[in-house]
Each structure stands twice: as C-alpha cells, then as structure tokens.
Image (cartoon, rainbow, N blue to C red):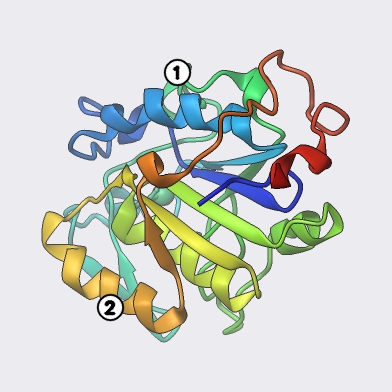
Amino acid sequence: MRIDPQRDALLVVDLQPDFMPGGALAVAEGDRVVAPIAALAPRFATVVATQDWHPRGHVSFASTHGRKPFTSLSLYGGEQMLWPDHCVAGTPGAQLHPGLPQALVTSIIRKGSRRAVDSYSAFRENVGPDGTRLPTGLAGYLRERGVTRLFVCGLARDYCVRASALDAAAAGFATWLVDDLTRPVDPESRRRVDEELRAAGVMLVDSAALAGDDVCRSDGSDGSEAHDGGRATS
Ligand code: VGL
Ligand code: ZN
C-alpha cells in the first residue's frame, strides 16, 4: 500500500530508553525497531511520538504500593498492572530515543503524568477515579490536520501500542499496526492481542509493504509545507 503524506500519519509509541534492553522496563528487542522507524518517519508529513511520562510515586509503580513488579492491583473497577519504576518525567530513561531524530517528529504527546491514573493509549488515559477516560486531544489534532489513516508502531505491542491502536480505530481512523516495528512485553500476548485488534478493525501491515519512493521530509522541516499532496497519487 502507498503512503499518502496528506492523509496518513505515523504514531510512534514510547520509543524511550527505559523500554530498551537494559532499561528499567526492558522490552526484548525493543532496540531493533528504532532504526527502521526512523527510516519510515520521513515519508509522513505528520509524525506523532508519545512519551510515557510519570511522576515519582505513580500509581502504576509497584514500589508505590510496596508490591512486586508484574503483579496487579484492582483499581477504579479495573486491573492495574504494577511495573518497575520507569519513565520518570525528565529522567534520561524517559527521553525520546536518540535514534529517532527529533527533527522528524511533528508533535509529542506525554502521557501518564497524573499520579493517580495510568495511561497506555496515546488518545485517552486509562480509567480514572471518576470512571472516565480523559482524552489527550490527539484525535482532534489529527482530524484538524486532515489525517484519516494512522500507522502505529513502537513499544510495547501488548500495552501502549495495543491501546493506542484500539483507541485510534474507535476514534474513526483507519488504523494499521506496523507489525515488524513493534515488540511486546509478553511474547505470549500475540494471539489475544491480534484477536482484539481484528475485532476492532485494526489491520496489520509490515513496513516492507508500505510502498513509497517519495520522501516527504528529509530536511527536518516541520513538514507542513514540505509535502506535495498531488504527488501521492502518481
Ligand atoms: C508501557 C507498561 C507501562 C508501554 C508503558 O509503553 O507499553 N507499558 N508503561
Ligand atoms: Zn508507564
């Protein structure tokens, strides 16, 4: 399929040192997706990156509750997985991975910043104390830019990528998960997550199938004037 820089956007989820091998919440092979995502990004006029961005003492940290990581807790009528402390706002582990050049990123959504609520999705927080999920504004941002199709990649496949893709589809975007450019926390999650994505209408695609000889941005400009929508159909 062919990327149309006008209506397509790339969503790069949580490409941060803490999710890389050796990081605080390491995702196996998380480092393997960085260079191919950086190579794909210039083909889109809109590239949104998310950063997991937690205060110390965040509700998702096992340490906050004196519990062990990778156990879970009942919270606001749902289940909160407890993680090692990770992506503490402003720390090196929470930075955008330097392998994704900042010049390629049109905007950044930081999520999980409220101490009492976790946020996996780029679009909405997890369920909060009042039973609702607060939107981040990303859906409106994309719509105002004329984006109708979203390609989702990054980490982790079974948590933030999954949640972002499901919410993107629910918000009405035609949504693809770029399957080779993501990795899960739990490799056993594959079948369950694929079924959830399928049921929501999220499609899977490999980056090799994303045709595009045209580089939309190679110069680090913001991309808003750099692309030529007329070229996409040629
Ligand atoms: C994530 C667990 C906790 C993710 C973030 O990026 O998938 N997973 N915080
Ligand atoms: Zn987190």
Q: Residue furthest top?
A: 219
Q: How many marks?
A: 2
Taking the image as shown, residue 228 lies to the left or right of residue 32, namely: right
Q: Quadrant of the C terminus?
A: top right
Front one among 2 and 74? 2
Q: Quadrant of residue 103?
A: top right
For residue 159, the mark is: none
Q: Position of residue 65 (x, y in %)?
A: 30, 58
Front one among 39 and 168? 39
First along the sequence among labels 2 and 1: 1
Q: Nearer the viewer, mark 2 or mark 1?
A: 2
Front one among 167 and 42? 42
Q: CA distance from mark 2 to mark 1?
A: 31 Å
Q: Quadrant of residue 35?
A: top left
Residue at image position (18%, 57%) is 70
Taking the image as shown, residue 182 lies to the left or right of residue 21, namely: right
Q: Quadrant of residue 150?
A: bottom right
Query: Pointer 1: residues within 10 angstroms few (<14), some, or many (20+)?
Result: some
**Residue 41 to residue 60: above or below:** above
Q: Position of residue 24 (x, y in %)?
A: 27, 33
Q: Secondary structure at mark 2?
A: helix
Q: Position of residue 41 (x, y in %)?
A: 56, 31
Kind of residue at disc 2 = Glu
Q: Which residue is mark 2?
A: 195
Residue at image position (65%, 74%) is 171
Q: Position of residue 48 (x, y in %)?
A: 63, 42
Q: Which residue is mark 1?
A: 99
Kind of residue at disc 1 = Gly
Residue at image position (81%, 42%) is 229
